[in-house]
Image (spheres, rainbow, N blue to C red):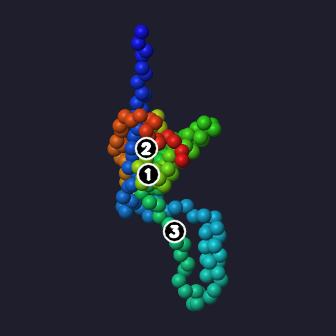
Amino acid sequence: MSKDKKQPVKVKIYSINTNLDVSGILADLLYKPIKEEERVEFQKEINDWLSKPEASRGPRPNLEREKMTGPEFFKDIVLKSLQMAHKTGNTALLRRTKAMGDLMDHAIEKKKGILEIMDEDFKYIKSAMGKADTWENHQGVAYAVVMVEDAINKAENDNRDPENSDAGKES
């Protein structure tokens, strides 16, 4: 009698290049959120500036804001889409959203902007992008959201042994 050998299971892995060229994106969409400490400090600067006589004020203080990189922008749009598509959820949904954010963080920090995700997660974010329906409807937002959706649609998929890929694994 011969024993049947099990063939290794092939899993679809999608590679999404999140290194988007954000040079054409509206600056307001690219700004990273302001930390509370920065907001408080800026408000103090404004109050000090306003307390001086107008003739001696000098230029109004400006808040220097950092802009997101292409991969950070990709993550921001995808997470906003997930929130729009699933406005509320149980802990399983929240864990999945957290896991998607962790995978994107891993791609940003360790994979040079290449997001590797399994078929189920790929379908999840693709579906969320299609269901997200509360975007501001103007050309700048349209350009940004479509750019992210196009990156998702261009994902290269290949069949690899899941043991040889770190997709879906946290570091």
Q: CA distance from mark 2 to mark 1?
A: 9 Å
Q: CA distance from mark 3 to mark 2?
A: 30 Å
Q: Earlier in the sequence, mark 3 or mark 2?
A: 3
Question: Whole-percent x and y of residue 47?
Answer: 64, 78
Q: Secondary structure at mark 1?
A: loop
Residue that mark 2 sits on: 116
Give above or below for 33 relative to 64. Answer: above
Q: Earlier in the sequence, mark 1 or mark 3?
A: 3
What amino acid is at disc 3? Answer: Arg
* Quadrant hosting residue 96: top right
Q: CA distance from mark 1 to mark 3?
A: 26 Å
What amino acid is at disc 1? Answer: Lys
Question: Whole-percent x and y of residue 68?
Answer: 47, 61
Question: Whole-percent x and y of residue 135?
Answer: 47, 50
Nearer the observer, disc 1 or disc 3? 1
Instruction: State the residue in front, 50 or 130.
Output: 130
Residue that mark 1 sits on: 111
What amino acid is at disc 2? Answer: Glu
Nearer the observer, disc 3 or disc 2? 2
Q: Residue at x 51, y 51 (%)?
A: 105
Q: Secondary structure at mark 3?
A: loop
Q: Residues within 10 Å of mark 1 (few under 14, many from 20)?
A: few
Instruction: State the residue in front, 11 or 76.
Output: 11
Residue that mark 3 sits on: 65
Q: Residue at x 55, y 80 (%)?
A: 60
